[in-house]
Amino acid sequence: NYFFNRVYSHPVAKIIINMSVGEESKEQGSLSGSLKLNVLQIIKLEQAQNGLKHSDYARYRHHCTNKLASLYKSLKMQHGRFKYQKRKIELHKINDSKHLQILLFSAERAWAHAMDLKQATERVPDHRQRNHLARRLARASRWAAELAAAASVHADNRTALETEAYHSWLSGQFYIERLTNSPILTPSTPPPSDPSKGSKSSASLVLVPERQTEAWVTALARLTRARRIFLDLSRLARDAESQSLCLSTADDIDSSIRFCNYKLQSTRSSFPIPQSEEDLLAFAQNNYGAEGRGGGGRLTG
């Protein structure tokens, strides 16, 4: 007993024991869904401190890149010193909130790149950059879908709801941008090809009114879902700051919802348009994650 007491009282032994206990509790916490991530607080703080007060999306994108490098390094998931190596985040191996932060800042980086391209196209219109913008928003939505999937398994209920609302908001923004500036196809539909030419036909890529109306309804439904979740979270907030963040985000989504309603009022198609908020929420639930959930539980960094 004297020998074991001397060994376990040694400073190095205490550190090793504490590390092993910490890792064990971390794994048990992740299995029980106890990881926490304050999505709104994190992104609002990072955006305010890194360029978005002055609409400097390039600076914020650069910050997200640096933040991701720091997170990968802390998790010992570097991409190699001389040759780039992809690092995969597997759903069943997530045991730290930093894994969720990697997915969050990957979505934020893609979103910031899209907003930077949008500013450039507003100054000098360019159809290729518009398509690039839509692709980056689709990428951001897919990262957010992976974040929501991971949070639903490994995080607490509030984090799972917040990430779900975050994904719905980004997905709705993607549909609006795609339909407003490049009304071609929804992300879940592969582009048809011209058999005679063996390539895509530009005439066949334009959405028919029914498909365009369905895309607008999808955008409206996902934005409505995000708004409802943020309003519900504001009622459950434990402090005034969290409540204010949720309410201000819901107010920001209102303008996009009004724009979708305006577009739907001017469409003429046979596609049934939900008339109530409950019908929109049911539509969003049935079509949730169509463009981003089929990732097999992993993404590359």
Image (tube, rainbow, N blue to C red):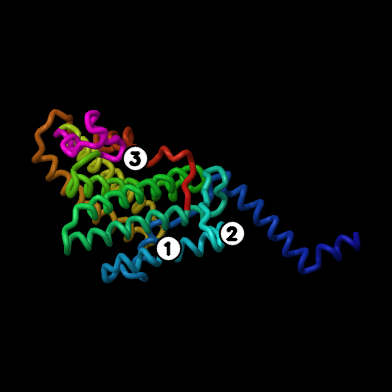
Determine the main secondary structure of the stretch shown in magenta.
loop
Q: CA distance from mark 3 to mark 1?
A: 24 Å
Q: Give the x, y percent position of residue 16.
A: 73, 61
Residue 277, visible in the rendered structure: no
Question: Which quadrant of the structure image shows residue 109?
Answer: bottom left
Give the crowd class for mark 2: few <14, some 14-19, many >=20 residues within 10 Å: few
**In the image, what residue occupies the spot 40% across and 67% down?**
63
**In the image, what residue occupies the spot 20% across and 59% down?**
121
- Determine which of the numbered discs, if any, sits on residue 233 in the image: none
Residue 90, visible in the rendered structure: yes
Cβ atoms under marks 1 and 2 closer than 8 Å: no
In the image, is 205 to the left or to the right of 166?
left
Q: Give the x, y percent position of residue 47.
A: 35, 65
Q: Quadrant of the N terminus?
A: bottom right
| Residue with the mark numbered 2 | 76
* Residue type at tag 1: Thr
* Residue type at tag 3: Glu
From which residue to which does the magenta span run?
A: 186-209
| Residue with the mark numbered 1 | 65
Q: CA distance from mark 1 to mark 2?
A: 16 Å
| Residue with the mark numbered 3 | 291
In the image, is 199 to the left or to the right of 164?
left
